[in-house]
Amino acid sequence: MGFLGLHYRIERKTMTLAIGIIFAASIGGIVEIAPLFTIHQTVEDAPDMRVYTPLELTGRNIYIREGCYACHSQMIRTLRDEVERYGPYSLAVESKYDHPMLWGSKRTGPDLARLGGKYSDDWHVKHLINPRNVVPESVMPPYAYLARNKIRTDDLGLHLAAMRKVGVPYTDEMIANASADAYGQTTPDTPYAEGVAKRYGAATNIRAFDGVAGEPTEMDALVAYLQILGKLTDAAHKTTTAKAGE
Ligand code: HEC
């Protein structure tokens, strides 16, 4: 056969064979690398996108510490059943400030990418204390201790500074006020709360997430984070033609 004949001839010439192997092996590399050259056209713009507040960032760290990503994804695919269940599919830009990203690869529980605003704070607190409180058939583990643990706020400026190193646009003012802002987000109607609204926008959720104002707990932080999921930008609602979830 012509092709086999060619193969036999190439096999006998070391250089030709080496070049052939490099060529064949590089196809996979090119397929993966080439799209990166157009990444600027691929990733959407979201000028309205805001960064996580210090409290939300703390909640995100708790989410990572507790391994919530092992059961929950944060990425809605473009498939129709997903869009109908969860809402507009996820855009790359929505993970812009996520270091590390938490897309996940397993869904024992539902996707959480559009969770913000779906339930009340009170629902989340009851659910996290014991999921069976609100969903009798749930297999999710309880996290009641989150309500008892106070968060550490004195090192939050360093957390923000670290995020800035990897590209999140935290300002000097945000970094300097990180501890006060974590407190302020859980204590409405105080000068601290005003500072949060000033730095992160008037639409920022400022309230006692766990039901008790002041002294932020891990419950406050995690619920603040859950309530902002999918809400940092509304680019997905504008860019995709999909209808928002119920
Ligand atoms: C062992 C797997 C597992 C782990 C770990 C887990 N969950 Fe869940 N989660 C579930 C399942 C299953 C459901 C669906 C039943 C329910 O609502 O409790 C669920 C539901 C939820 C819901 C409701 C989502 C919706 O749209 O109705 C939220 C919010 C949630 N989990 C948050 C968390 C957080 C935060 C953590 C980490 C602290 C966590 N989960 C850890 C399995 C898990």
Image (cartoon, rainbow, N blue to C red):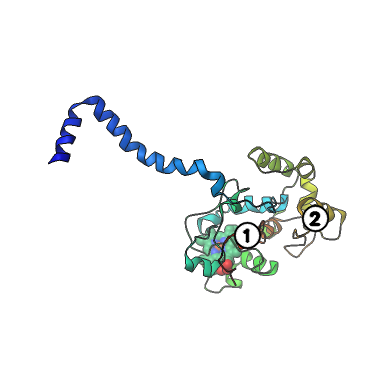
Return the residue nearer the eye: 151 or 8: 8
| Disc 1 target residue | 230
Task: For residue 117, say whether it is visible.
Answer: yes
Residue 167: x %, y % from top left: 64, 41
Q: Quadrant of the N terminus?
A: top left
For the residue labelled by badge 1, is the local secondary structure a helix, a strand or a loop? loop
For the residue labelled by badge 2, is the local secondary structure a helix, a strand or a loop? helix
Determine the residue located farthest toward the left in the rendered image: 1
Question: What amino acid is at disc 1?
Answer: Gly
The 10 Å Cα crowd at callout 1, few under 14, some 14 to 19, many 20 or more, is many
Label tally: 2
Q: State the CA–CA distance, disc 1 to disc 2.
A: 19 Å
The residue at the point 29 percent across, 29 percent down is 19
Side of 89 relative to 128 (left or right): left
Ligand 1 resides in the quarter of the picture at: bottom right
Q: Quadrant of the C terminus?
A: bottom right
Residue 86: x %, y % from top left: 55, 66
The residue at the point 48 percent across, 68 percent down is 81
> Mark 1 vs mark 2: which is more N-terminal?
2
Task: For residue 140, say whether it is visible.
Answer: no
Vertical relation: 78 (above or below) 168 = below
| Disc 2 target residue | 197
The 10 Å Cα crowd at callout 2, few under 14, some 14 to 19, many 20 or more, is some
Question: What amino acid is at disc 2?
Answer: Ala
The residue at the point 57 percent across, 46 percent down is 100
